[in-house]
Amino acid sequence: MKILLATDGSETARAALDFLLRFPLPEGSEIDLLSVTDHHHLPPITRGDLTREQRQAIGETERAVRQDAERILAQAAERVRGAGRPGSTEVRIGHPAEEIRLAAAEHGAELIVLGSHGHRGLRRLILGSVSGSVLQYAECSVLIVRPRTEGQAPAPDGRLRILLCLDGSAPAQKAIELCAGLPLRGRAAVTLLTVMPLITLYRQDIRQRLSWHWQEQKAAATADLEKAAAIIRPTAEDVSTLLREDADEAGAILAAAQALGSDLIVLGHKGRSAIERVLLGSVTGRIAAQAPCAVLAVRD
Amino acid sequence: MLRWIGDETLLQGLVAGLSTPALLLTIVVCIALLSKGADWMIDGVVSLAARTGLPKIVIGATVVSLGTTLPEAFVSVMAAYMGNPGLALGNGVGSIIADTGLIFGLTCILATVPVNRFILNRTGWVQVGSATLLVVIAVTLLIAAPPGIEPRLERWVGFFFLGLLAVYLYVTYRWARQDSARAGPAQNGADEALLGLALSWIMVIGGLVLVVSGARVLVPSASEIAVRWGVPDDVIAATLVALGTSLPELMTAIAAVRKGHPEITVGNIVGADVLNTLFVIGAAAAAAPLAIPANFYYYHFPAMLLILYSFRVFITMNRSGVFYRWQGVWLLTIYAVYVVLQYALNIDPAHG
């Protein structure tokens, strides 16, 4: 698997690297490292009215920024090499989210990894603008990592607790295949979760639950969960399933992650249209913003 | 946005946390709000009719109906987006049956309802025409569908219905203008105490907001009480939930009869029927294709057509200019038989 890890040396970026190095990646995976300096942080060198001294000062600032980024990358690269993963390093200057997306496309990355916030992000309040933008516009899967909070202990057996969310969509199917391709045996416990959306407006849920259509959907969802569990079991023996009925799909997933002490939520990212995002909101976006753990959004 | 509007988590959490006496008090307050909202709306409509020269029946069929069908529209669009086509389609069809059979039937029994032949011979045809068009499209899709595949109302049907809705609203306005020109300015009750135009609109819209939001709190509160008193879920579904989205129409009808303007109810029911097809089902199908379950073909569609064509026949035969009480009894009986058979035969209910 070809992976691109974006880092700015912040605490969350270091947590992203820690998480990635602990993650059971497929054999032969490569980790490329990228650091992007936001061009808005540099003075505009193209202005014609600058004196030579001013131009020199700006050039020095840029060199210093670049050197700082290279230092951050060198530290990360050492750890990546130490973990036996080959890969390149690259510094870019530009719009961070856009540069990360472009670099991922140029590197042929199947997965972008980044922290939930950079240096400037309001940690744990909302999703940082860079990670939010990468999540929305990247053409490949995106793993957003949050530093572990106090009271959030790792599993006693050291295994990764993965919550894989299924909704019958093509990206969710891709998420199943991705998990089935990871060496999870003895290293992870996987819970497969499907949330059936209830309509509680005017208590339609009472009627909805009684209908044959709902019972059929429930039976189909249970069968799909079992089918997915059968696909994953050869690579991860500890697989369980959960079926929830809830009006708030994202809320139910977050509650399950909290209750299970999950380290990672994996879900298919459907990429809703602009109208659908306005009307329904983005389940993935909300989970990435509010999850107590890392979130892997798998693209079709 | 839809999620936010439709998210009842907070409301249901609040309702579940209330003691039974507090819930009963909430229900009483909700009913008072519904009643007050409906009163304001009727006063606003009467005044608006006098101010603008538009017949009350037309304002009932457009502004009031658009407001009172909003609950069905929200539920259906949400259901369509969330992959529950039976609920989406059922809301529209079920509301037509409940509005015409139950609410209009009751109104006819309780009050003398005038027949505005000029308007009803026009909008009345749109009412049965739109429902008939829905059934014709559904049957055509059934015939054309490959064996074993459920026919679906595709998104283009939804957009087509929404287009027809725009045409309907425009044409209704034209008819109303013709009617008021034909009847003269005195027909809208010049003796009424008139409100200003702006205040009339505020009364109508404020009343609608009270009615729609009052119903939204009343349904979960009443359902919670019913659950606590051990009422089975299927009984709650058949009564409280089935009537929930039609409560605004019911309260409007009661207020209109009480205040002596039953023609607003006629307009509201005819308009709500048209809007349930063109707006509720149209918007839901435009949001996501709606599969048509088999029970709609053998049960819900025939019941809807029977009620609508009965209403149509009554308009044609009522030469005296009013609906008769026995006609209300007939409509109400069809509705009662429809509900009872649905549960006796264990058919998935259509109504939301």
Image (cartoon, rainbow, N blue to C red):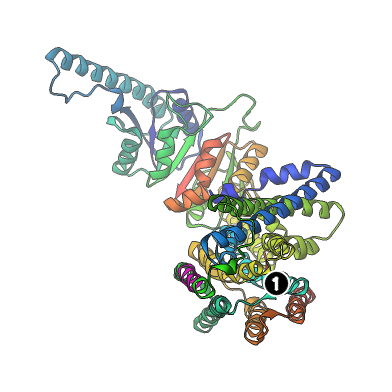
Residue at figure coordinates x 47%, y 32% from the top left:
A116
Q: B207 or B333, which is in the foreground?
A: B207
- Magenta stretch contains residue B68: no
Residue at figure coordinates x 57%, y 38% from the top left:
A187
The residue pinned by badge 1 equals: B104
Answer left or right for A27 relative to A35. right
Where residue B141 appears, x then y in whole percent? 51, 79
Residue at figure coordinates x 34%, y 23% from the top left:
A74
From this viewpoint, is residue B129 visible?
A: no
Q: Assign a secondary structure to mark 1.
A: helix
Q: Is residue A268 above or below residue A123?
A: below
State the predominant SS element of the stretch in magenta.
helix
Q: Which residues are magenta?
A: B169-178
Q: How many labels sit on residues?
A: 1
| Badge 1: chain ID | B
Q: B43 or A206, which is in the foreground?
A: B43
Where residue B117 appears, x then y in whole percent? 59, 80
Q: Is residue B134 above or below residue A95?
A: below
- Magenta stretch contains residue B176: yes
Q: B349 or B338, which is in the foreground?
A: B338
Which quadrant holds residue B349? Answer: bottom right
**What is the three-letter code of the residue carrying label 1?**
Phe
